[in-house]
Every structure is written in structure tokens, then in C-alpha cells.
Image (spheres, helix red, strand yellow):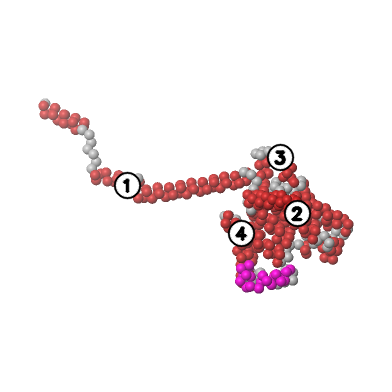
Amino acid sequence: MSQQRTTLEKDAAKKAAPEAPKTEDAAAPDASRSSTSAPGTPVAGFFAFLGSIIASAWMAFANTIGDSIAFVERWLFNGKKALYGIAVTRIVFGVIAIGLLASNFSTRLYTFGSGSAWNGEIAEPVSDFPKIWLFSAFHAVAANDVAFTLLYIALMLLAVLFMLGWRFRIVLPVFFVMWIGFIEMNDMVGDQGDNMFRIALILMFFTDAAARWSLDARRRAKREWFPEGSSPNQIGTVLHNLALVALTAQVAFVYGSGGLFKAQGAPWASGYAVYDPLQTMRFGTWPVLSDLITAWGPMVAIGTWGSILLQGAFLLALLSRPTRLIALFGILGFHIMIGVLMGLPWFSLTMIAIDSIFIRDRSWKRLSAGIARRWRAAVVRRPADVGGAG
């Protein structure tokens, strides 16, 4: 009996005892299965590093996109840009129109009117513009000398009002229509400056070109139609700035394509292309000056290759202040040389007028303040000198 009781106690103790832990050999397969995903292994570290690189690159890209959008939004909406520059464009364009009309007044009938009928454009214009009724005023009266002269004088008066910025929103469309109709009367006397003039006039419809240095600016100072921050004001700001972007793109196309076209020509690559036109009767308008400029070979090469580099790199050079100064002074000298040496003043002035938008407003204001200060000093000094002389 006692032996049976002892056996039962041993069985109960055996059941109640906890299971022995697995041996190292038994646990080895599980350990090997989990070793590849352990946090401290090289493979896991590599994937963690790669993930952090991708996340950082994505965050940098997203921040760049966000900053770019914010910059564009601020640039478009936070005020009209280049108001003084586009005002200079308006003024110089007016000077160009007045100068061209005045210099051709004595030969207006021979160049554009009834005297030019020999070229056949009165019967069948080369340009499509005179065939459009909106631009056909000059073509309709080309054979009538009196009517043509009256329209000619009216266009000169419009050019004066355009330059002064008087009722610009009304004057600009009328001036644009009449100017295009006039300038397309004789295709033989035009140049590429006419195309840029026309493109810039179209874009000026969307700019506030009379906001500075104009009669409209004086009137607007007394009464503003649309208050700051209003929807019409914001729309006008965006259209103005977008028109400047379009005008900048057009200038970039002209200079960039011009530089690339020159670079592929043998005379330009060889460095003597500047010499050729200055020795022709058509473009060598100042023979003595042309001979002086082209007498030294290295100067011809510098002018040839320099014009290619200047035109090709003009837009990129505007991105920083030091290079912008070099580009603007360089392009100014470039057009002055073309206007003087090659007898193309109106083309050169057109490009100079458009390039004025790349000069900052604060620079124009400093220039204006300096001129006004010297003018006041001269006016004050003059009566004193007259009184002293008496």
C-alpha cells in the first residue's frame, strides 16, 4: 500500500513539474530564420540608409518645388515689376516713331505714298497687313497725296501722345493700328526692328507702361481707379508681369538665335565677319569711320567673336548683378555700333528700348534723382549768373 502511494506521488510530481527548456541545438533553426531581419545586421542597416537617402531627396525635391511655387506667386502678385524700365521703352518707342516720321517727311510720298507706286505695292501689297481692313487706312489713301499727308501728320501727333503717356490706354490701340498700317506700306524699306517694334507694342497692351514718367501718372496720383489689393488691381499686376516675361522670352529668342546662326557661319568662325558689311556701300555709311574700326585685325576678331558670345550668353548673364552689368553695357555698345556704323539707328534704338526692362527700377530712380538734382542746380545757378553779369 505504501509502495503504491509512493508511485502515485511520483507521477503527480512529474506532471506538476515545468517542461525543461529547449536545448541550444533545438533552438538553432529559429535563430537562423530570424537572423536576416535583426535590427543590427548590415543588410537591415543598408536598407535603412537607402530609405533615409530617398526620403531626404524627396523632401528636398518637395521643398524646392514649394519654394519655387511660392517665389513665382510672390513675383507675379507682389507688385508690378520694371515699371520704370517699361516706361523708358514707351518713351524711346515714341522717339523712334517721331524720328522716323520726321526724317522721312520730305520724301514721304516717294517712299510710302503715291511716288512708290512703281514697286507695285499700292496695287498688290507684299505684306498681309494692308489687306486687313483694320490696318488699311494708309493703303486706302496712298494715291491721294493730301489725305496721305494728313494721316501722316496724325500719326506723328499720336506718337507724341504715346511718348508722353497721355490717355495711354486709348492712344495705344489707335497708334498701334495706324503705325502697322504705315510701316507696312513699303516692304523694301523695312528691317527687323519693325518686327520687334510690333511685337513689343502688342505686349504693351498688357503692361502698365504709363505708370511712371507720364501724364497719366500725374493724373493717377490724384485719383486711383482700383485700390491696392482689389481683384482688378491683382489681375492687372499679373498681366503686367506676364507680359514682361513674354517680352524677355522674345529678346532671348532674338539674341540666342542670332548668336547660334552667326556661330555656324565661316566668316564668324574665322573672325572677320564684322569687316564685310562695313566695307559695303549699303551698310558702310561712314567710310572713314569704318576704315578706322577695321584697320586693326585683332579688333575685328574681338568684335566678331565678342558679338557671338554676348548674344549667346545674354539671358544667362542677367542672372547675377556683376554679369548683368557687363551684359547690359555690352549690348548697349553693340547696338550703338550697329546704329552708327551700319546706319540702322531705328533698329538699334528699338532693341535698346526693349532692353531697358532689364535695368532695375531702383537704378532708374537713382538716375532720375541725379538728373533732377543737377537740373535744379543748373536752374538755380543760371539766374545768379545773369544777375551777377548785370
Pointer 3 or 2: first along the chain:
3
The label number, if any, that marks residue 224 in the structure image: 3
Pointer 2 or 4: first along the chain:
4
The reply to whether the C-beta atoms of the residues labelled 1 and 2 are less than 8 Å apart is no
Compute the Cα span from label 4 to label 3: 37 Å
Give the vertical position of 88 relative to 3 (above or below): below
Disc 2 is placed on an element classified as helix
Amino acid at circle 3:
Glu
Residue in the picture at 71% in, 58% down: 350
Question: Is residue 298 highlighted in magenta?
Answer: yes
Pointer 1 or 2: first along the chain:
1
Q: Position of residue 80 (x, y in %)?
A: 65, 46
The reply to whether the C-beta atoms of the residues labelled 3 and 1 are less than 8 Å apart is no
In the image: residue 380, left or right of residue 149: left
> Mark 1 or 2, which is nearer the eye?
2
Residue in the picture at 78% in, 55% down: 179
Magenta residues, start to end: 284-304
